[in-house]
Image (cartoon, helix red, strand yellow):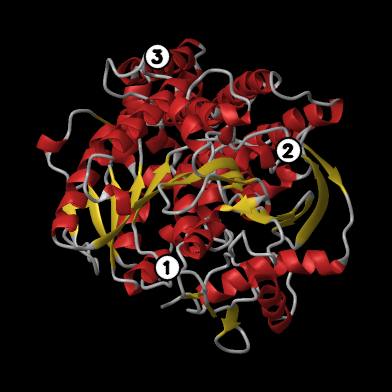
Amino acid sequence: MMNLLKGRYAVLYAFIIYFLTFSFLIRIALFNASAQHVAFSLGETLKIFVLGLFYDLGTSLMLVTLYSLFLLLIPTKKYQKKWNRFFTPAVLFFFLVITLFSFFAELTFWQEFESRFNFIAVDYLIYTYEVIHNINESYPLPLLISAVLLIALAITLLFYKLKIFKKTFESTVPFKQRIIFSSTLIAISLTFCFIVKNSWAEHGNNRYANELSKAGIYSFFAAFKNNELNYKDFYNLIDDKEAFNLMRKELAEANAKFLSSGLSIKRFVANDKQELKPNVITITVESLSADFLAHYGNKENLTPFLDSTADNSVFFSNMYATGTRTVRGMEALTLCIPPTPGSSIVRRMDNEHLFSVGAVFKKKGYVNTFFYGGDGYFDNMNHFFGNNGYNIVDRGRKLLNETFDGSRKIIKDGEVTFENAWGICDEDIFNVVIEDADAKYKAHQLFNNFIMTTSNHRPYTFPANKINIPSGTREAAVRYTDYAIEQFIKKIKRKPWFNNTVIVIVADHCASSAGKNEIDISKYQIPCMILNLKNQPALNISKMTSQIDLFATLWHLLGWKYTNGFFSKNVLDESYKPRVVLGTYQKLVYMRNDSMVVLSPQHKMEHYIYNKAKNEQNKAKFPDAFANQAIANYQTAFELFKNGGLKE
């Protein structure tokens, strides 16, 4: 090794040693943190460190590729000039800062998601304003940046002390030898870049072991490259006609009639009840896991209002989110569709003028409005809602190129009492909603409002003196959100429009998606309740339901006749068979009762029996008919979106 540190390539090899050392230390830290949640077998431990070293080595070679080319092409005389004695240490310092910052980011990203960098990190790179402010409010950013710079400086000085710079500048490596060294390094780097897949680490059911086997920087670029997956290229398929026939059978109801034959699921839903047309306010609560509520066993009294309210509502006590991100929850609650692989449809191209929940309300004479306390530019929310039948009210910025079918109102400073990086506090957004509802009531307009809260999000800060828990923790943020919702309900009960207004409270997703299984079903369970529904006694719907079924059930209770182009069903219908659809951006799950099928890229499919009491997934083998039903859900959803079948 000492010989490697003596020639022209000394700095390059020393950087690789540094990178491997720090990567190993990060892996040790994450391994120890994960060991508190799950036990690792000997084989999994070997995989974590041996495969991890392989990824780290490949990543380090990719990082030095351009410098390797520089070492090859610069003649010895020019390489030994004074300019290079400044240039090479400066380049080293730059790469030290970048990689040290990425190591820090890995630790914070793991703290939030218990995962190496994935497509969420790619998304966050785009929205630097929100993310930098979020990090600044969650961590002492000036101190951390200073620490990164000092460590980078210390390592650079160590290179000087070990005379690595002196040796590289004094060496005279012939061009022929440089060709061998550089071409070998570049060839290995390119081979690693184009041949090695991040998914090689994803064999096995222990999600922690899979993630720990990866390298953070390589995972980031892999996610950037694979942000969207073509279902038909990567997943199990059946004949399209068979897939649609299976979906039509699953979605069939006694009071529903399909509007056409073939590759369509649109049907007209009849109803014998008297039609009610209340205003509808949907409060979509950020990261409200079911296990925050006492109804699901929580002992911390975090949600006293929601717990007391659930007993007097139409309570979906066994509902599951479709994904692990806000945009996935929005997709489920507006498009009522299984989570197709890749990013949520909210963030994709060609997502305008879709057949949405808002479209059904609009045909019934409602005005749809999307309320968000942050900048709706984030995650493409304004574009999606604004071009799918909703007006926009957010705390954002005017952009020159933004175009919406609906209108947009920006929340003014005078309407804000508290704000952090992610937006105004929940009380403030609720006050904005009340003011808007008052105006619509005076104008004799029915309204359908979709509210997205922000307070239950890192940095978990909110107005002081509201609750008896200090801000800064997830538990405190949950307690504050519960308080804010309670104050909102108290205020609107005094409004003349309250008696004709239904309130829906539902989570977008859970606070954490990581568990002992790669797809941890318990991490998808969310609370959902419908309040103030006229002539409807309290009802606990304990059967397993999906986010996508919420509005089909509400419209049934309201006695609506409407066109249904969704993958949703009224869960109170006799034909309803409990099932959920959920997943990550790659893994897709179809579960009916305790039987689950997991679809993965490379045309993989796994079968499990889910033991809810123990939160265990045991391998099984189901008949082809059940597996085909799972495939049909995702294949038809992808087909309809990709080929315009979801358009109005």
Q: Which mark, residue 356?
A: 1
Which residue is more in the foreground, 543 or 368?
A: 543
- The amino acid sitting under disc 2 is Asn
Which residue is under mark 3?
469
For the residues carrying marks 1 and 2, which lies nearer the camera in this image? 1
Report the disc number at residue 378: none
Residue 470 percent location from the top left of the image: 37, 13
Point 82% across, 53% down: residue: 607
Question: 338 or 526, which is in the foreground?
Answer: 526
Say left or right for 605 vs 622.
left
- Which quarter of the figure has residue 426? top left
- Separation of marks 1 and 3 at Cα, in angstroms: 39 Å
Residue 517 numbered mark, or none: 2
246 vs 502, nearest the viewer:
502
Q: Is residue 425 visible?
A: no
Can the viewer see residue 121? yes
**Is 352 left or right of 257, judged from the image as shown?**
left
Q: Residue furthest top?
A: 161
Q: Position of residue 50 (x, y in %)?
A: 76, 31
